[in-house]
């Protein structure tokens, strides 16, 4: 089909389904925490584990098909460092966004209208005490942390102390949520923010969750690319086509 092979189409479909699953489970944990009126600590634990374990499973089952990006800024960074062809990377990003929207629609349909107005289906928004620039900086730094984990456990020849890549990525997502849910909601994934924002029509501070993660991912991609140009041979061979 055009410039995309059948395997490319399968990979894009895996990204769509993986993101749909991740958003349904992750935002579902937010809805559950609010529905059962959990205290702050229990709510934070539920949301962090819902997103972290969700991404472990989503990455694990898609890794052999698509590489398990499950995040538009991961695909963007991989395009920048030539680990994926630009066209396929762009298709991944579209598939991820569609999957996120489907995940939020499924959550809306399965939880009922009684939850939608109160919880915005897990849509992100800044804590009122957090300034706009502080929100962007927080999302930038946490996305950079996530991308550093991904590059080092997935692409580094020397490996990440032989830890499973899905497990390392999931643990990073859990830590990120522990650190940032009270402040920004801990997106680090524009598709995760897009799904509930669109379905619940809740766009408060939405640009924070695009600008911060994109800048954080591109910063790591630039640093990684620069490191390669310096001649350090720690990276697995990139796709320069």
Image: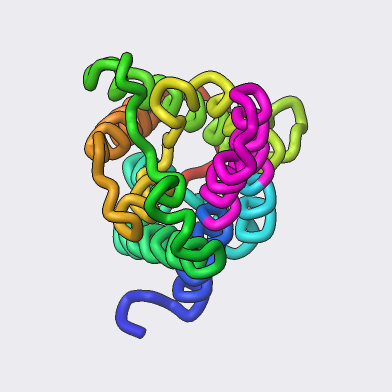
The residue that appears at 37% across and 26% down in the rendered structure is 139
Q: Nearer the viewer, residue 71 or 51?
A: 51
Relative to 177, is 64 above or below?
Answer: below
Would you identify the image quadrant in which residue 14 lies? bottom right
Would residue 238 be found to the left or right of residue 127 on screen? right
In percent of width and height, residue 228 lies at: 42, 28
Q: Nearer the viewer, residue 164 or 49?
A: 49
Please identify the quadrant where the N terminus is shown. bottom left
Would residue 223 be found to the left or right of residue 21 on screen? left
Relative to 156, is 142 above or below?
Answer: above
The residue that appears at 68% across and 43% down in the rendered structure is 53
Q: Which residues are magenta?
A: 24-53
The residue that appears at 38% across and 65% down in the rendered structure is 98
Q: Main secondary structure of the magenta part?
A: helix
Would residue 180 be found to the left or right of residue 79 on screen? right
Q: Nearer the viewer, residue 224 or 100?
A: 100
Would you identify the image quadrant in which residue 130 lies? top left
In percent of width and height, residue 110 lies at: 55, 67
In percent of width and height, residue 215 lies at: 28, 30
Please identify the quadrant where the C terminus is shown. bottom left
Q: Nearer the viewer, residue 53 or 114?
A: 114
Task: Residue 218: tell me if it is visible.
Answer: yes
């Amino acid at each position: 089909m055009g410039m995309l092979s059948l395997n490319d189409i399968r990979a894009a479909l895996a990204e769509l389904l993986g993101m749909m699953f991740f958003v349904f489970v992750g935002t579902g944990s937010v809805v559950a925490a609010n529905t059962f009126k959990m205290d702050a600590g229990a709510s934070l634990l539920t949301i962090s584990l819902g997103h972290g374990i969700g991404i472990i499973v989503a990455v694990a089952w898609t890794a052999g098909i698509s590489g398990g990006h499950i995040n538009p800024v991961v695909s963007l960074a991989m395009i920048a460092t030539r680990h994926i062809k630009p066209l396929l990377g762009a298709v991944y990003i579209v598939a991820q966004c569609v999957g996120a929207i489907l995940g939020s629609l499924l959550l809306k349909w399965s939880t009922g209208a009684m939850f939608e107005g109160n919880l915005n289906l897990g849509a992100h928004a800044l804590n009122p005490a957090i300034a706009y620039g502080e929100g962007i900086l927080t999302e930038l730094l946490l996305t950079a942390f996530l991308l550093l984990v991904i590059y080092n456990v997935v692409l580094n020849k020397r490996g990440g102390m032989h830890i499973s890549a899905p497990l390392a990525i999931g643990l990073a997502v859990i830590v990120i949520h522990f650190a940032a849910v009270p402040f920004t909601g801990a997106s680090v994934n524009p598709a995760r923010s897009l799904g509930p924002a669109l379905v619940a029509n809740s766009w408060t501070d939405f640009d924070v969750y695009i600008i911060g993660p994109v800048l954080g991912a591109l910063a790591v991609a630039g640093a990684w690319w620069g490191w390669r140009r310096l001649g350090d041979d720690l990276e697995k061979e990139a796709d320069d086509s």
